[in-house]
Image (cartoon, rainbow, N blue to C red):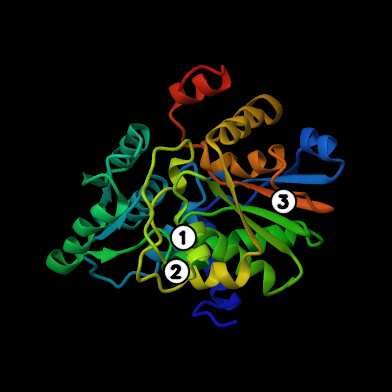
C-alpha cells in the first residue's frame, strides 16, 4: 500500500490548523444506540465555523501558500468554496470560487458573504473547472482543489486522529464519500494506527462518481444529478492522483442511498438528535436506518455538514414535496 501522504503529514496538519478550528465533538446517540443495541457515537463536525468539515483541508492548504500568492481558486459544490473563502479572508488572499448551476443558492450566498468572488459556469463541476484552470494559467492563481490534494487530504485526516484519541476502541466508522478527500484522510489516520478499524463510505445513488470509478477499476465520469446530498456531487477527475487509489486501498466498503433514505436521515437528525443536517451530512445516520450498514460494537458516524437550505429542510421534516 503506497501513498504520497503519511500519518506524519496529518499530525503536522493538526498542529498547523489547531488555532483555527473547533475540536471534534463526539457524543453517544441515545436513540440510535437503543435502536441497534450497540454503542453509536455521533461526530459533530458540522460545528465548524463554516458549517462543514471542509475548513480543515482548506485552512491547512492556505497556511502553506507561498508568500506573494496572487490568489486562490477552486471548483466547489459549496462547502469547500465556503471553507476556502473563509481561510483566504483570514490570510488576506483574494479568492475566486468556480461552481456549476447545480449549487444551491444558500451556499452561493454564504461564499459571497465571506468576500470571495463566485463564478457560475455550466451544469457540472467539470465545466466549472475550465474557468478555474484558466485563472491558474492566465492570472497566476493557486488551485486548491476540494479533495485530490495532499494538503487537503491531510487536513481532513485530522478528524481521524481526533476520533481515535477520543474513542480508542472504535471498530467501525461511517464517513461521507464524494471526491474522497475526507474519507482518504480519515481512513489513513485510523488504519495507520488501527488497521482493524472498518471504514465505510456512504454516498447517494444519484451520481456517486467514486463508487462508479471503483467498480470500473479507474476514474470515470458520471452524470451529475440533482440530489438531497448535493455536497457529495461532482466527479473525481479522470486524472485523479491520490484519492482513487487511497479509497481503493483503505476503504472497506461503499454504500449508496436513495433520496428517500437520505431524507429519513435528515428527519432522524432533527427529531431524535435535535440537529439540523444537510443531506450529505446525514448519510451515515441514513445508512444505519436503511439497514445498509451493520454497526459494530462501537461505531462512530460522522455528521459532516449542516449547510442546507432551510426551506428545503422544513419541507423534508414535514414530509412535504421537495
Q: Residue at x 27, y 50 (%)?
A: 97
Whether tag 2 and tag 1 are in contact, CB under 8 A, the answer is: yes
* Circle 1 residues within 10 Å: few <14, some 14–19, many ≥20: many
- Left-right relation of 30 to 252: right
Q: How far apart, in angstroms, are the residues tagged by discs 3 and 1?
A: 21 Å
| Disc 2, SS | helix
Q: Nearer the viewer, residue 93 or 201?
A: 201
Residue 142 locus on image (x, y percent): 26, 66
Give the CA separation, mark 2 to mark 1.
Answer: 6 Å
Quarter of the image where the N terminus is located? bottom right
Residue drawn at 24 percent across, 55 percent down: 94
In the rendered structure, find residue 57 and report the number of the disc placed on it.
1
Q: Position of residue 256 (x, y in %)?
A: 57, 48
Q: Which mark is residue 151?
A: 2
Discs 3, 1 touching: Cβ within 8 Å:
no
Mark drawn on residue 300: 3
Query: Disc 3 on helix, strand or loop?
Result: strand
**Picture coordinates of residue 20 (x, y %)?**
49, 55
Q: Is the Cβ of the residue at disc 3 closer than 8 Å to that at disc 2? A: no
The crowding category of the residue bearing disc 2, from other C-alpha atoms within 10 Å (few below 14, some 14 to 19, many at least 20), is many
Residue nearest the viewer, comparing 115 with 252: 252
* Mark 3 surroundings within 10 Å by alpha-carbon count, few (fewer than 14), some (14 through 19), many (20 or more): many
What kind of element bears circle 1?
A: helix
Amino acid at each position: 500500500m503506497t501513498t504520497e501522504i503519511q500519518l506524519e503529514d496529518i499530525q503536522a496538519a493538526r498542529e498547523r490548523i489547531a488555532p483555527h478550528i473547533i475540536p471534534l465533538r463526539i457524543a453517544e446517540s441515545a436513540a440510535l444506540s437503543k435502536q441497534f443495541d450497540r454503542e453509536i457515537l455521533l461526530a459533530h463536525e458540522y460545528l465548524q465555523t463554516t458549517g462543514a468539515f471542509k475548513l480543515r483541508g482548506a485552512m491547512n492548504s492556505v497556511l502553506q501558500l507561498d508568500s506573494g500568492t496572487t490568489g486562490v481558486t477552486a471548483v466547489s459544490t459549496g462547502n469547500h468554496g465556503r471553507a476556502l473563502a473563509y481561510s483566504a479572508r483570514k490570510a488576506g488572499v483574494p479568492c475566486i470560487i468556480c461552481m456549476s448551476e447545480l449549487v444551491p443558492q444558500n451556499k452561493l450566498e454564504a461564499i459571497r458573504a465571506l468576500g470571495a468572488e463566485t463564478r457560475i459556469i455550466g451544469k457540472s463541476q467539470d465545466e466549472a473547472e475550465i474557468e478555474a484552470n484558466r485563472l491558474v494559467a492566465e492570472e497566476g492563481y493557486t488551485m486548491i482543489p476540494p479533495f485530490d490534494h495532499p494538503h487537503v487530504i491531510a487536513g481532513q485526516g485530522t478528524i481521524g486522529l481526533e476520533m481515535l484519541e477520543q474513542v480508542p476502541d472504535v471498530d467501525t466508522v461511517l464517513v461521507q464519500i464524494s471526491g474522497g478527500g475526507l474519507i482518504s484522510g480519515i481512513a489513513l489516520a485510523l488504519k495507520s494506527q488501527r488497521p482493524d478499524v472498518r471504514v465505510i463510505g456512504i454516498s447517494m445513488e444519484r451520481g456517486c462518481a467514486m463508487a462508479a470509478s471503483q467498480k470500473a477499476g479507474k476514474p470515470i465520469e458520471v452524470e451529475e444529478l440533482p440530489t438531497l446530498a448535493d455536497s457529495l456531487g461532482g466527479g473525481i477527475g479522470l486524472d485523479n492522483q491520490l484519492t482513487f487509489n487511497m479509497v481503493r486501498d483503505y476503504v472497506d466498503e461503499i454504500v449508496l442511498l436513495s433520496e428517500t433514505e437520505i431524507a429519513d436521515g435528515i428527519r432522524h437528525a432533527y427529531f431524535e438528535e435535535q440537529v439540523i443536517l444537510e443531506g450529505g451530512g446525514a448519510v451515515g445516520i441514513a445508512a444505519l436506518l436503511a439497514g445498509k450498514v451493520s454497526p459494530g460494537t462501537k461505531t462512530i458516524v460522522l455528521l459532516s455538514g449542516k449547510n442546507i437550505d432551510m426551506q428545503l429542510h422544513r419541507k423534508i421534516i414535514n414530509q412535504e414535496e421537495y
